[in-house]
Image: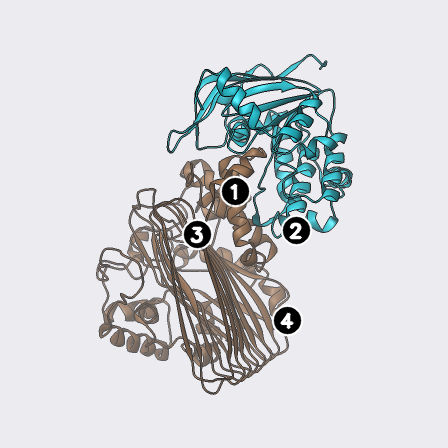
Amino acid sequence: MSSNEVLSELTNQEYRHGFVTDVESEVFRPGLDEEIVAAISAKKKEPQWLLDWRLKAYRHWLGMTEPKWAKVTYPPIDYQAIRYFAAPKSTKDGPQSLADVDPELLRTYEKLGVPLEERAILAGVAVDAVFDSVSVATTFRESLAKVGVIFCSFSEAVHQHPDLVKKYLGSVVPYTDNFFATLNSAVFSDGSFCFVPKGVRCPMELSTYFRINQPDTGQFERTLIVAEEGASVSYLEGCTAPKRDTNQLHAAVVELVALDDAKIKYSTVQNWYPGDKEGKGGIYNFVTKRGKCAGKRSKIAWTQVETGSSITWKYPSCVLLGDDSVGEFYSVALANNYQQADTGTKMIHIGKNTRSTIVSKGISAGHGQNTYRGGVSIAKSAIGARNYSQCDSLLLGDKCGAHTFPYLDVKTSTAQIEHEASTSKIGEDQLFYCRQRGLTTEDAVSLIVNGFAKRVIRELPMEFAVEATKLLGVSLEGSVG
Amino acid sequence: MNVTTTILEIRNLKARIAEDGTEILKGVDLTVRAGEVHAIMGPNGSGKSTLAHVLSGREGYEVTDGSVLYKGKDLLSMPPEMRAREGVFLSFQYPVEIPGVANTYFLRMALNAVRKHRGLPEVDAMDFLALVEEKAALVEMEDALLSRNVNEGFSGGEKKRNEIFQMAVLDPTLAILDETDSGLDIDALRVIASGVNSLRSADRAMLLITHYQRLLNYIVPDVIHVLSDGRIVRTGDKSLALLLEEKGYGWLEEDASVGAGKVS
């Protein structure tokens, strides 16, 4: 099927399925029980084993409590008030042209330098195939297929590559893992699936835009990426969400598996709606991302630029199982206004001579609270393991906060661990120096912040790096002076 | 612009530290014309750096009286970046480090901000490179320093070179050099002074702020002023600097307080 056909199928499916008049019926009643879980599964025509898996997760979830250890505060979430499935609204209900889109949103796109045609897609104008819970018309699909790379929506993979999904789903983040991951396992809507077979270097960066486009709809994406022996792939995840007044729960799960000599690079620019200046609204982003370096000499690198969401709870981690495997985590997290970010990583060293690098840059402005929480654990078996952690915080103003919680658990004396940390304030003298050379305060802040984050930004693929640089500037507008 | 154009006209300027109200400038009068180089000398605490900061718009000071006209415009009402774009350049006594920001990238942003203000298009990459090479040569700036982050890990001398290099690229109308000689060895001083001298022109005015007259052996000013306790107490030519070298500042301060009707 060509990507055009996929597009048209997705965008026109209201006709095929006969939901011509009653689009709203594609939104389930609020609440969560076994009936809803079964209905989601049925809606997607899933095989019995997957329904069983969802139900096991749901039953397990009933006995779990929401984690409270993160340094974030928010009103209690009523899980029974959330709708757990929403098919895309008809394109006819969305804005019909850019003229119908919230001008504030367009202003942001303009500042970010988003190309015109992409602005339309991001703003939900009726041209796209990337909707709420049903996802991913992927371009370049055919040329990927030629080299044997599978890149499709998760739902599609369930039907077309059931053996692969069955083999790897939950193999890194089991359905029992944590409250949010378990919830996701029960009700996940869709997401991406990527499989790169043995010896194949994926010929292009794979990317997907996700976005939220409907009020009170929980988002539960599920992404699974597998790189077989000697394979390599770079995956880009970018998010943006339209302005919205009600808080929205977002609990995604991403699993990565790298076999012998495989490399996976996973880059994220996260720009969900952060709430307004008073902290009203915004996305709750409770994400579980984990990669397993299952094979020898395999490598998984997470790079993230987190500027959005009112609450971020996210710890992309690496399980370094294979000998000589490598885990990397590069992060810039920005908390402005009333945003709260509690983010970091876990590096779990099990194989011999495993190496990990952690570079975390936290930026706090306004009343933002930014927490780095990182764990390095080195098992007895991880002889010769090494970790380097660098964790820097930058403060703008005096009402924000930066917090650092490094955890270390080392069970072998042969390990080497280095940890560096710093906290600095954007100094009056730095700002004045820039202004004395003709830069506005805002340009100066953007320059200083991007300099601070450069070590991470340069790990991003080129076009993402450009976007991220602009994003940092835009996200900090009005935070100084 | 002919030599009689007035670049800077300071009248009865009084300023205090905003935080604690300490009065630092107690009525400064100064006129600087295009093409002129004026030196402001004075002992520690006399208000030299405060004058530089007030002229460039640094926060933390309150002007309580007087006026400053720059090319006939009210300088004090402009934010610092506007003063910079209008052609006021401050060579910092302590140049600031900006980690992660390449020196030339920073300078290009600055140059484009100035050019935009003057209605010029952004400088293109090749022209900028040529400009940078030409101006770097003036202060014998090594290529490596150009690509490194702004002042990060620079030695004292390298930082001062970088300031004069920036000045050369930005081509200001009024350059204020705050203690440019501090922390320099004699070789570096020679190089920097020669860079500054090459930037002297009929269109440009310079204020050299210095504690020691050593700098003035290399950059010979047209006029020397002595600032003491927030006022200019002596104005003269180069010989004044030599007198100060010989006798120190003490005699002037006594003189000044008598002149101001105060008991010291």
Q: Which amino acid does the dot numbered 4 rest on?
A: Arg
Pointers 4 and 3 within a single chain: yes
Q: Please name the colour scheme applied to the rendered image.
A: by chain
**Label disc, if present, on residue A430 of the rendered structure:** 1
Q: Which chain is cyan?
A: B
Q: Which amino acid does the dot numbered 1 rest on?
A: Gln
Decide: few, some or many residues near mark 1? Use Cα within 10 Å; few <14, some 14-19, many ≥20. Answer: some
Task: Looking at the picture, tell me which residue is in the foreground, B50 or B158.
Answer: B50
Q: Residue at label 2?
A: B148
Q: Earlier in the sequence, mark 1 or mark 3?
A: 3
Quadrant in which residue B86 is drawn: top right
Q: Residue at label 4?
A: A201
Quadrant in which residue A85 is drawn: bottom left
Q: Which amino acid does the dot numbered 3 rest on?
A: Thr
Q: Is residue B104 visible?
A: yes
**Label disc, if present, on residue A339 of the rendered structure:** none
Circle 2: element type:
loop
How far is disc 4 from disc 1 in space, using C-alphas? 44 Å
Q: Earlier in the sequence, mark 4 or mark 1?
A: 4
Instruction: State which chain disc 2 sits on.
Output: B
Instruction: State which chain disc 4 sits on.
Output: A
Pointers 4 and 1 within a single chain: yes
Q: Residue at label 3?
A: A307
Q: Colour of chain A?
A: brown
The residue at 61%/68% (across/down) is A202
Q: Is residue A130 visible?
A: no
Residue A284, given in percent of the width and then of the height, sits at 33, 56
Image vertical order of residue A403 relative to residue A259, above or below: above
User: Which tag is nearer the camera, tag 4 or tag 3?
Assistant: 3
The residue at 27%/56% (across/down) is A73
Circle 3: element type:
loop
Pointers 2 and 1 within a single chain: no
